Amino acid sequence: MMDSNEIKSENSITENNSPILVVDDEESLRLTFKMFLSRAGYGPVSSASSYDEALELLKTQKFDLIVSDIVMEGSSGIDLLRQVKELGLKCPMVMVTGYPNINSAAEAVRLGAFDYLAKPVKKDNLLRTARMALQQYNLHKENEKLILEKDRYQQYLETVFRSIKDLVVTVDSEMIIIDMNNEAKKWLKKLSPEAQAHADGRIDELPCFSEIFAFDAQTVLREENEVAEHRVEFEMEGHGVTVFRVSAAPLLTSDGYFLGVVLVARDVSRLEALEQRDVRTGLHRLVGNSRPMQTVYTLVENVGKVDTTILITGESGTGKELVAEALHLESPRRDMPMVKVDCTAIPENLLESELFGHKKGSFTGADRDRQGRILQADGGTLFLDEIGDISSMMQLRLLRFLQERTFYPVGEDRPIKVDVRVITATNADLKSQVVAGNFREDLYYRLKVVDIVLPPLRERSDDIPLLVKKFIERFSKRLDKSIHGISDQALGQLIKYRWPGNVRELEHVVERACVLCSGMTITQSNLPLEIQDQENVPSQPESNSPYSHQAELESGNENEEERIINTLKLTYGNKAQAARILGIDRSTLYRKLRQFDIDADNLL
């Protein structure tokens, strides 16, 4: 995600109308690049179809950026790059080619190209590179005004220090720090605030920079040769492991006198995150801008395109079905059916027929042929929810189907072959069930080719304002009410609450609040009492289980059956409403009804 300085810099670029020249002998690519750049706010954007045409434009107009193909009829983009340098033009050049190789890349970089892109060039890559090139060019132009009266060495040093986001540190022959750029100072403060006071001492005595730079500095001082770029892990307390890309080179005067060492480091993880995309607020029906959700979005996009079995795990109410939908929409099967099966909502004796289908007369009541859910999903996606609750027999049948991609309908002796992508989900700890002997180990690993773990809402509280906004918009429209927001106090209570029912519970709470709200703003009085008065609610101890949201119901205490019965009576047998009040998923309630042999219809 761009920081405020980058956003301000980008805005200044577009507001100042940075002229750009696109050079390519393919008209379609010229028009495409021109359209991408113009729509992003850059311009005016000019184009040239050849080296000669580009040269004529460069003699009569000024450009802040040149985007040129390397391979063209006649003179190449490399020739144009050389000519730009010979003319003394300072604008950056981005080279594009459909035949990338190390030699052409090295030649372009040696001649001063800003960056190197391979065809087909994605829109995001082009705009990101243009933005970075223009930002650096603007910094370069600003720096030139400040360093006109300085000599060549000072100009070079100032340009390096001010125009790049890398950490740059220079040390003398005694390992004493001569200078460091602002980025290095910021990192030094972040890594070791107490070390900032000693930023003018020896680099091998700073507890953080010594691990990153000291070895390379000693090598250059000893051999007076460059140290090739390599990667160094550095563990920051509270921030995990950061990987730096580090290099070092001798610091020489214009006449070759050895002064010390220039050390350069780049935070690779930060740079790659910036280059990939800005922080997103959602993907399909998923909502959230927290770091855990960014990880989920990336996983969904990556594995959605790969036709493999996926296991989605997480507490009830975290959005496993929404992730399954997103995976289907990201896959090549998006235009084919997605068939969903809640394994706990179907009686065990009917689940086999529901999945695999049956022939007429294969069992009592089978008065016609029935097409199973697997065959309905042929060519598309089959989503099996609450897979952890299926019987041993169904586990075996499902394993065989996943291995062979064929199945036999009940009462049929001829196999049917289908092309189905299987996605499963569970709120149970399948690994523990495998250890306990309740779930087949071979099926577990067959399902868990790729696993996506959804975080509970209490671990992504940053997403609550976004979710609340979305739910208010939905329910105010559904209820035909003019509700435009929520008070800070009410939102604060929602953020502070632990949400045993996760996003589903939050959705129900906001729906209730919208029903009760008589004005344009949801207030604390519209929230349930347990959320309003959290100070008087005893804190709940953390559970070691990854799915502890239903710990009270799952614990098997003596009041569990009684509480379920009382809740069903309160809701007049409405199982969905009872599950919401109990803070559990409907599938869990169905399982409990079978366990305690409770007939909800007889409770009315």
Image (tube, grey):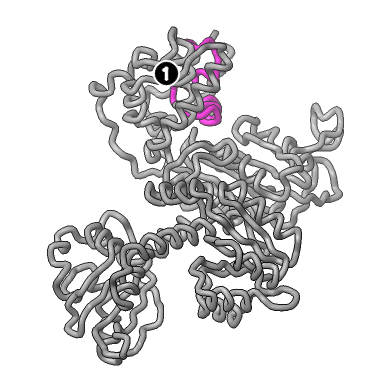
**Secondary structure mainly formed by the magenta segment:** helix
Q: Is residue 113 above or below residue 185?
A: below
Magenta run includes residue 585:
yes
* Residue beneath the point at 39% across and 13% down: 526
- Left or right: residue 29 versus residue 246 is right
Q: What residue sits right under mark 1 in the picture?
A: 562
Q: Position of residue 551 (x, y in %)?
A: 39, 34
* Residue beneath the point at 16% across and 73% down: 205
* Residue beneath the point at 35% across and 70% down: 160
Q: Position of residue 67 (x, y in %)?
A: 60, 64
Question: Can residue 432 be seen by looking at this rendering?
Answer: no
Q: Position of residue 280 (x, y in %)?
A: 50, 44
**Quarter of the view holding residue 449:** bottom right
Identify the image quadrant of the C terminus.
Answer: top right
Residue type beneath disc 1: Glu
- SS class, disc 1: helix
- Left or right: residue 586 versus residue 336 is left
Q: Which residues are magenta?
A: 569-593
Magenta run includes residue 63:
no
**Quarter of the view holding residue 560:** top left
Question: Can residue 364 be seen by looking at this rendering?
Answer: yes
Front residue of this view, candidates 564 and 133: 133
- Left or right: residue 547 versus residue 116 is left
Q: Position of residue 323 (x, y in %)?
A: 57, 41
- Left or right: residue 229 versus residue 345 is left
Front residue of this view, candidates 11 and 396: 11
Q: Is residue 199 above or below residue 8?
A: below
Q: Give the farthest residue toward the front.
A: 60
Front residue of this view, candidates 271 and 379: 271
